[in-house]
Image (cartoon, rainbow, N blue to C red):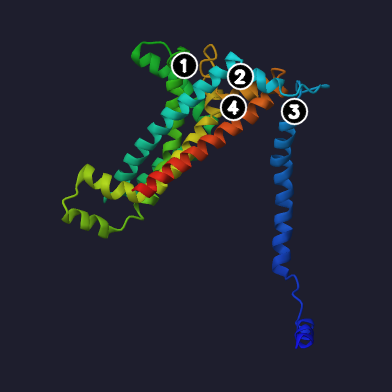
Amino acid sequence: MKKKEAQAELLKPKKTVTERERTFAMIAIPILILFFLFNTLPLIKGFIYSFTNFKGYGSYEWVGLRNYIDLFTDARVGKSYLFTVKLAFFTTILVNVLSLLMALGLNAKIKFKSALRGMYFLPNILGALVVGYIFNYFFTYIVPAIFHSTSILASGSKAWIAVMIVCAWQAIAMNTIIYISGLQTVPEDVYEAGMLDGATGWSKFRHLTFPLIIPFFTINMVLCMKNFLMVFDQIMALTKGGPAQSTESISFLIYNNGMSGGQFGFQSANAVIFFIVIVTISVFQMRFLNSKEEQL
């Protein structure tokens, strides 16, 4: 019996690679190679350089964990982390509150709803550097001329607010679209049942709408926090880390001091720590918000 089964297996036609599968492989392999060369390989090399005193040019020596130890005693690095976390925290809250309010308004039964959605999405299409330079001119010349004051970008205590406004203005577009997508998944039957129970206004939103769109809220919160922690273009266009390094984000510090400041090895270590910080915050957000989803 076993011999017959073995013979039957041998007689079965062997599977051959189809032309479709070969085409997919031919497309995927170059993409994987490019991804490795321009993403994975630089990450590996950066991790290796973090254990050296490499300046970005010339020879270098291995210094072990010295760069990582120095990071925790460098006042400039600590200041940049505090600024970046503060900016990301407040901008994330601002963006999600305004995005949700806009989504609720645009999801209502109003005229020209599709056109308004397109208009709200326009800021997301523009490049961050272009937007930054436009707002730089706005904050430097137009606002001071109207209010007869100095530029907010020249204030060490207020310049971060200008950065927050620009980041929020551009990020609200995408978040609004995501919230609109979430609101469209809420069945009308839920609202009809809620109206019979007397749910209106804030009560309707709190007990019916928000619990059903909380997965979209989770997505927006995690993406916002991650993107704002990595803020770079807006800093480059608006303040270049000034005044007096008061708006120097971690990404800008890594780029500025690593590429032109002769601290390539040191800033590579900073980049590794920064990567760990972003992953840790994102995982914490996901777990915390997912637990809230289960409670609701």
Give the crowd class for mark 1: few <14, some 14-19, many >=20 residues within 10 Å. Answer: many
Which numbered marker is on residue 72?
Answer: 2
Vertically, is 241 above or below 165?
above
Looking at numbered disc 2 in the image, what kind of residue is underneath it?
Answer: Phe
Looking at the rendered image, the quarter that the N terminus falls into is bottom right
| Foreground tag (4 vs 3) | 3
Give the crowd class for mark 2: few <14, some 14-19, many >=20 residues within 10 Å. Answer: few
| Foreground tag (3 vs 2) | 2
Comes first in the chain, label 4 or label 3: 3
Q: Which of 218 and 249 is in front in this view?
A: 218
Residue appearing at x 71%, y 50% in the figure: 32
Where is residue 150? Give x, y as percent. Answer: 41, 11
| Foreground tag (4 vs 1) | 4
| Foreground tag (1 vs 2) | 2
The reply to whether residue 118 is visible in this rendering is: no
| Foreground tag (4 vs 2) | 2
